Image: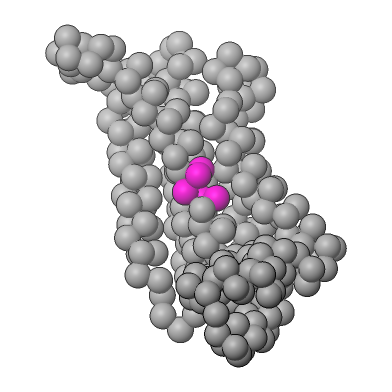
Amino acid sequence: MKKTYMDRLARWALWRLPREEAESVIADYQDIVNHPPGTEEELVRRLGKPQDVVGLLTDSRPYTVWLGVFILLSLCALAPCFSDDNSALWVHYFDFIAYILSVLGTLGVLVWFRRYGAKEQRMPRALPIVLTVLIAWCGGLILFNWLWMRDPIAYVQATEWLEPYIGNFTMVVTRVFRFGSIAAALAGVWGLVKARTGDRRWIAVYIMALSSVLLMIGSLLLMRTLASFGDGWYWPYLWQYIIIFLAGLIGTGAALR
């Protein structure tokens, strides 16, 4: 039961306090909890709830700054997920918006956590697995776009046989991209939380998740609004997706150092 109490207190301390201060508080309360030992109920009566204990030790200004950074970074990943296919802002200016969000999110998370985050001796075991999935997904998105962009008519004809089983294939893809972008954005927010409360290298998940969101929403808006095709029409779009992907890989490499 003591471990449960200390786990909760450690999570709250790492979330609310600067890293060095949080580690100092955790060490101090580890001694307090062990002398004398007691059940979780006794510890709560003697010391208070973990969130209340940490709340009394929290300096509101640094914590408010961190919450502002966390909200801004989270919005960079989440905002595109709720783009409107009929909005001129998203349809006509998505290229500009995507670059702004990519630069703001990637540089913001690198600067903040390189300064205030902590790097553990061993890389978290789950981190390479999550990154591999995100990188493979982003690569698959670019491959999918290249396949249908080369010959949109052949793409439609090649997927007609699926309609009796799943309905219109393009509509299924748009739903996958829409809900997939939300899942990727939430994975990115989860990466921010893990980076704050653990190893800062978890920001690599945020960076690749952000790239994944921008690729899916960019593909979705293009598929929903494109009306005409010409020779080589797709290269500007494809290069944009490749640049977003490469930026994500570069940011991920910087995050893991």
Residue 62, quarter of picture: bottom right
Residue 137 seen in render: yes
- Between 237 and 72, which is closer to the camera in this rendering? 72
**Residue 58: image location, x then y, percent:** 78, 68
- Between 9 and 167, which is closer to the camera in this rendering? 9
- Between 49 and 104, which is closer to the camera in this rendering? 49
Residue at the (35%, 16%) spot, across then down: 171
Colour logic: one colour
Q: Is residue 187 magenta?
A: yes
Residue 141, quarter of picture: top left
Residue at the (46%, 84%) spot, across then down: 121
**Residue 101: image location, x then y, percent:** 63, 44
Residue at the (55%, 85%) spot, across then down: 37
Q: Is residue 213 magenta?
A: no
**Residue 110: image location, x then y, percent:** 61, 64
Q: Is residue 144 shown left or right of residue 203?
A: left
Q: Is residue 122 shown left or right of residue 196?
A: left
Q: Is residue 48 shown left or right of residue 149?
A: right
Main SS of the magenta part reads helix
Q: Is residue 238 above or below residue 74?
A: above
**Which range of residues does the magenta coloring cover?**
185-189
**Residue 195: image location, x then y, percent:** 55, 65
Residue at the (43%, 30%) spot, across then down: 179
